């Protein structure tokens, strides 16, 4: 079992906990146009990643979800026009 540990802003963390957000988007390139760190952390390890644990900013508040799949695709947010690594997740059944 391998867990991905991204940090979310309070807004996106709260939307995730409320159930409004079930896909995490991470950029494929950084602002200078070079490959982002997410290729190594997400795409290259997509077969190993089974869970994602989000942190609410840099606090100790976290939530964990089961990863359904990891793929590449569009983001529905206006202005986010590139392709993104997409981590699809669902609530962990108790």
Image (cartoon, rainbow, N blue to C red):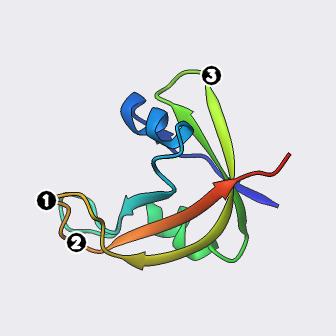
* Residue 33 percent coordinates (x, y): 20, 68
41 relative position to 3: left or right: left
Q: Pointer 2: what residue?
A: 82
* Residue 2 percent coordinates (x, y): 75, 59
| Number of marks in picture | 3
Q: Is residue 27 above or below residue 16?
A: below
- The answer to whether mark 2 and mark 1 are in CB contact below 8 A is no
Select label 2 or label 1 by which is in front: 1
* Distance between mark 3 and mark 2 Cα atoms: 31 Å
* Residue 35 percent coordinates (x, y): 33, 70
Residue at 55%, 21% in the rendered image:
59
Q: Pointer 3: what residue?
A: 60
Q: Residues within 10 Å of mark 2 (few under 14, many from 20)?
A: few
Residue at 37%, 32% in the rendered image:
11
* Quadrant of image for the N terminus: bottom right
Q: Is residue 31 above or below residue 39?
A: above
> SS of the residue at dot 1?
loop
> SS of the residue at dot 2?
loop
Q: Residues within 10 Å of mark 3 (few under 14, many from 20)?
A: few
Viewer-proximal residue among 80 and 40: 80
Residue at 20%, 62% in the rendered image:
80
């Amino acid at each position: 079992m391998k867990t991905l540990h991204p940090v979310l802003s309070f807004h996106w963390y709260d939307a995730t906990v409320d159930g409004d957000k079930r896909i995490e988007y991470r950029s494929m390139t950084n602002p200078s146009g070079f490959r982002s760190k997410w290729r190594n952390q997400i795409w290259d390890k997509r077969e190993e990643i089974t869970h994602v644990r989000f942190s609410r900013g840099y606090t100790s508040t976290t939530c964990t979800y089961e990863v359904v799949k990891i793929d590449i695709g569009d983001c529905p947010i206006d202005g986010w026009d590139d392709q993104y690594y997409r981590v699809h997740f669902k609530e962990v059944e108790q």
